[in-house]
Image (cartoon, rainbow, N blue to C red):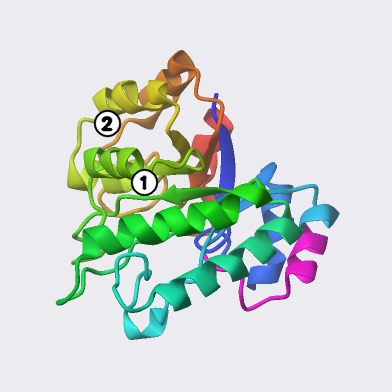
Amino acid sequence: MPRFAANLSMLYREVDFLERFAAAAADGFQAVEFLFPYDHAPEQLAALLRAHGLQQVLFNAPPGDWDAGERGLACIAGREAEFLAGIERALLYAQQLACPRIHVMAGIVPAAGNAHATYVANLRAAAALAAPCGVTLMVEPINGRDMPGYFLRRQDQAHALLEEIGAANVQVQMDLYHCQIAEGDLATKLRQYLPTGRVGHLQIAGVPGRHEPDVGEIHYPYLFALLDELGYAGWVGCEYLPAGATSAGLGWLRRS
């Protein structure tokens, strides 16, 4: 079976964020991911990881002003300096947390400026900063229903951008929830893209409600078996919103 990482921004929300590390470890998770670590000192988070025997596998670079609706800066012309400062801050956290992956959000397409050219140039510059740190940058297609106007929406678009960026330490973060909503045909896409070696991280959730992966239209047991068949050795992030208490909804994991 695949290796599952608890997303601490979405799971265990019945307790405070800093208590979620212990909760995840108690439920048998060996790895965690989350959206943004920047409200806490990296030393504090690193100590929690060590205390509970957890590996940090992913977090997001600063997205701009999240509360104002910004969802990343990579495609926004005129914000390049702020974007790269955010990458540098994220890399400091990655080194403290021994985290090998940072998700770089693309952003909402602005009314002016060449979003495509800006995105490619920014990812090339960010990849050059991340390479000496041994960090891989992740790009994730996100469906337009949940995030209208987002620059990066499809798997084929993401893989074409990787070709254009031309950096070995930029990979695709394939979220099967977003992929199902935007495109569907998940098994075919896994068979198409996993053998390329350019998918560095997977995430899951039920569709349409983004709840546990055993609720909704996706038959995850089939896809988990397919991941084994394809030899996927990376992590699968559990980035879903529990319908109730997190631990009570982990029956799918115990059956896996």
Identity of the residue furthest to the bottom in this view: 68
Whether the magenta-drawn stretch holds residue 179 is answered as: no
Coordinates of residue 106 in the picture (x, y in percent): 34, 61
Q: Earlier in the sequence, mark 2 or mark 1?
A: 1
Corner quadrant of residue 229: top left
Q: Is residue 138 left or right of residue 91?
A: left
Name the residue at 36% across, 58% down: 121
Pointer 2 and pointer 1: residues touching (CB < 8 Å)? no
Q: Is residue 25 left or right of residue 73?
A: right
Image: 26 above or below 218: below
Horizontal and vertical percent for residue 9?
53, 64
Of 4 and 190, nearer the camera is 190
| Residue type (three-letter) at the residue carrying disc 2 | Leu
Look at discs 2 and 1 and give the one toward the viewer.
Answer: 1
**Which quadrant, please, contains the N terminus?**
top right
Using the rendered view, name the quadrant where residue 161 is placed: top left
- Could you say where residue 57 lies in the image, as x and y percent from the top left? 61, 47
Q: Which mark is residue 165?
A: 1
Dot 1 falls on a residue whose secondary structure is helix
Residue beneath disc 2: 186
Label 2 – label 1 distance at C-alpha: 25 Å
189 relative to 21 in the view: left or right: left
Q: Residue at x 58, y 61 (%)?
A: 12
Q: Is residue 117 above or below residue 229?
A: below
Please name the amino acid that badge 1 sits on. Answer: Ile
- Extent of the magenta region: 35-48
x and y percentages locating residue 5 in the rendered image: 58, 44
